Amino acid sequence: MPRSPRRGKMPDHAGDDIALDREWGATLLAYFARFPAERGGVLVGKRSAGRVEITAAVFPPQQIATPVRCSFDTAVVEGVNDTLKAVEETRIGPYAPTVLGWVHSHPHMGVFLSAQDERTLTTWTDLDADAVALVADPFAPEHQIAGWGRACVPRRLWVGDDREALMLNQGAKLADVLSGFARPGQGGLWDVVGCGAVVSVRVSRRRAAHHRTEENR
């Protein structure tokens, strides 16, 4: 379960706060704890005045995955955007209307932005000024999740029990649609981290065929 923000004097913040469901945060940490290497993905959710609300994360096949570095095909972001447009009129639409930014793990390192992370986030915000970055370390004794935005400024993190996040059936539907937008070169295992469950889709490297599995946290 993600720790609550530190009490007392807070650092200066600028831009949108980041809100997430406590159970979703716990699912994300449990997912990251399965991997000894860093793992990166795409955040989806909602934006409103002064706040972004994370409802799910999509993790594509990793091009690089080491204890200190990860990367994935940046064309994945376009595929996730196309997927969200495709489900816009379904029950998933209100929960995940847009791509919010980028998330990755720092196993056993703590939550911070490295110099490379800062360059990556700057690239995101050059394309989308409202993009945010989330970093998580499931092995940290406290402060396991933190977020940043434009100019790599920390964002205030709100963790609550009344947030909206994709549940198992919604995550499964999103994964099925997502597999249809994966490019042939993006074959492999895709994971959708929702609230309390991870849905995995293995996409063919030659076409968008897939086999889905579901795993409760």
Image (cartoon, helix red, strand yellow):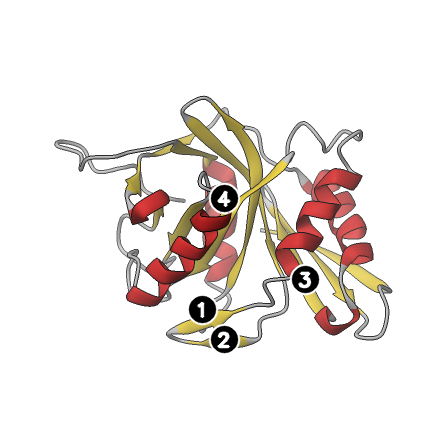
Residue 108 seen anywhere in this rendered image of the structure: no
Looking at the image, residue 197 sits to the left or right of residue 178; the answer is left
As measured in the structure, the alpha-carbon distance from the residue carrying label 1 to the one carrying label 4 is 24 Å
Q: Residue at x 42, y 73 (%)?
A: 69
Residue pointed to by mark 4: 128
Q: Residue furthest top?
A: 49
Q: Residue at x 31, y 47 (%)?
A: 151
Mark sitting earlier along the chain (1/4): 1
Name which residue type carries label 1: Glu
Residue pointed to by mark 1: 38
Residue pointed to by mark 3: 190
| Secondary structure under the numbered disc 4 in the rendered image | loop
As measured in the structure, the alpha-carbon distance from the residue carrying label 1 to the one carrying label 2 is 6 Å
| Residue 160 screen position, x and y as percent | 42, 29
Q: Quadrant of the N terminus?
A: top left
Name which residue type carries label 3: Trp
Name which residue type carries label 4: Asp
Mark sitting earlier along the chain (4/3): 4
Name which residue type carries label 2: Ala
| Disc marking residue 65 | 2
